[in-house]
């Protein structure tokens, strides 16, 4: 670990997040670029902030932005295909309005420290193309998982879909014929792309049938049993939890149990019509809701949104898991001497001091 002594540079940070915790350190800047990650007492003096890997939103439905705010209802009434509230809004809204709403959510993600996201995009090839159109060079890195426009498999549509996106992201297995599920999974894996699915959100589903599909990860698992979670751990299938979306429906993921069983857990904000895609809010919700299940440490909560999300995306080898001079980083201002506790209790977007994308700093 290097100790920086060059006094003419600008420094940001008093702490740096590592996989094992927050340690003393800072980043050194020259001409708007990070040129060194420094460990030890900060040369910057009064700067009181923590340097984190930028957040990874491991599960979001950006297309749902057009349907904000969602009415209170059950999971089935609100999000289930084909006639849940959000699907009706998607069908009745113009492409232009949907793209504008998605761009607003993408801008919010960027401004609140997210460097990458995994989107489950409905509406078939057209839905994927609309999200691609909403993306700009300033947007977070997008992993777009599409699905057929209707809940059925056709070879021609799936070929076109996989040519336009990064994989397949499905609703619950109960929405699909078992043969179609198998064909979708095989098609995605044959193309070298991701396959993922919502599982056991409102009711328990057969985890054996899910794991037979060899998903890259699953989402929710709020109604999963201990045996279901242990099966995910044995199969090394990560679980992405979405605490605020679950809370909206009166549900809660058992994050302490998942971690205790050795499940790789990442964090997502889920439906943009329910929860803003703000990972600081999601971290706080995960930490808060976990208390009723035995609790998790502030470090574990922050890792769900940083290192753990990177592990999910490392299936494709796109994002590193270590802080380097070229990494995507977020610098968050704190007030006390326990930065991780502040991140899980009181940090807000206004506390974000700067973001780094590919080594280039952007002030906020």
Image: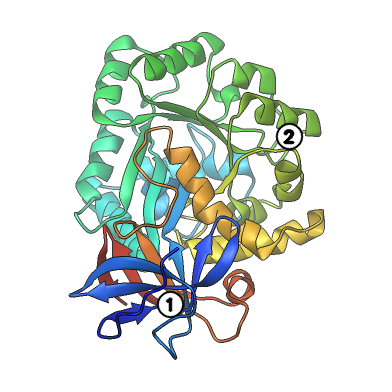
Q: Quadrant of residue 210?
A: top right
Where residue 340 appears, x then y in whole percent? Answer: 60, 70
Q: Quadrant of residue 21?
A: bottom right
Q: For residue 13, which numbered disc appears in the image?
A: 1
Looking at the image, residue 323 sits to the left or right of residue 130; the answer is right
Where residue 335 appears, x then y in whole percent? Answer: 55, 86
Question: Label 2: few (<14), some or many (≥20) within 10 Å?
Answer: many
Inspect this view and state whether residue 112 appears: no
Q: Which residue occupies 67% across, 31% down?
A: 233
Inspect this view and state whether residue 307 appears: yes
Image quadrant holding the C terminus, namely bottom left
Earlier in the chain: of badge 2 and badge 1, it is 1
Q: Nearer the viewer, mark 2 or mark 1?
A: 1
Q: Quadrant of residue 285?
A: bottom right
Q: In the displayed structure, would residue 183 be above or below residue 357? A: above
Q: Label 2's element? A: loop
Where residue 345 appears, x then y in whole percent? Answer: 63, 73
Question: Between residues 357 and 251, which one lies in front from this camera angle?
Answer: 357
Looking at the image, residue 158 sits to the left or right of residue 235; the answer is left
Mark 2 lies on residue: 224
Question: Between residues 31 and 128, which one lies in front from this camera angle?
Answer: 31
Image quadrant holding the N terminus, namely bottom left
Q: From mark 2 to mark 1, how far is it between C-alphas?
A: 40 Å
């Amino acid at each position: 670990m290097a100790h920086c002594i060059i006094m003419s540079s600008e420094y940001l940070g008093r702490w740096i997040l590592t996989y094992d915790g927050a340690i003393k350190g800072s980043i050194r800047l020259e001409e708007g670029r990070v040129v060194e990650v420094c460990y030890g007492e900060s040369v910057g003096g009064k700067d009181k902030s923590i340097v984190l890997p930028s957040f990874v939103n491991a599960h979001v439905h950006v297309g749902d932005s057009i349907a904000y705010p969602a009415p209170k209802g059950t999971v089935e009434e609100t999000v289930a295909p084909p006639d849940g509230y959000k699907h009706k809004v998607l069908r009745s809204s113009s492409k232009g309005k949907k793209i504008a709403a998605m761009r607003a959510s993408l801008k919010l993600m960027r401004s609140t420290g997210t460097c990458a996201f995994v989107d489950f995009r409905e509406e078939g090839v057209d839905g994927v193309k609309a999200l691609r159109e909403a993306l700009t060079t300033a947007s977070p890195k997008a992993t777009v998982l599409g699905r057929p426009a209707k809940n059925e498999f056709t070879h021609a549509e799936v070929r076109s879909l996989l040519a336009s996106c990064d994989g397949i992201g499905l609703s619950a297995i109960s929405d699909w014929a078992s043969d179609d599920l198998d064909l979708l999974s095989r098609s995605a894996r044959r193309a070298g792309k991701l396959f993922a699915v919502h599982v056991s959100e409102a009711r328990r589903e057969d985890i054996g049938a899910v794991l037979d599909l060899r998903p890259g990860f699953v989402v929710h698992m709020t109604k999963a049993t201990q045996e279901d979670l242990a099966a995910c751990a044995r199969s090394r299938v990560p679980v992405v939890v979405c605490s605020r979306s679950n809370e909206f429906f009166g549900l809660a993921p058992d994050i302490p149990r998942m971690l205790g069983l050795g499940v790789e857990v990442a964090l997502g904000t889920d439906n943009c019509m329910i929860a803003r895609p703000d990972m600081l809010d999601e971290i706080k919700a995960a930490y808060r809701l976990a208390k009723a299940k035995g609790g998790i440490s502030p470090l574990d909560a922050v890792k769900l949104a940083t290192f753990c999300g990177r592990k999910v995306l490392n299936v494709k080898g796109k994002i590193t898991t270590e802080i380097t001079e070229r990494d995507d980083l977020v610098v968050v201002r704190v007030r006390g001497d326990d930065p991780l506790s502040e991140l899980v209790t009181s940090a807000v977007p206004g506390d974000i001091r700067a973001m780094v994308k590919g080594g280039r700093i952007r002030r906020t």
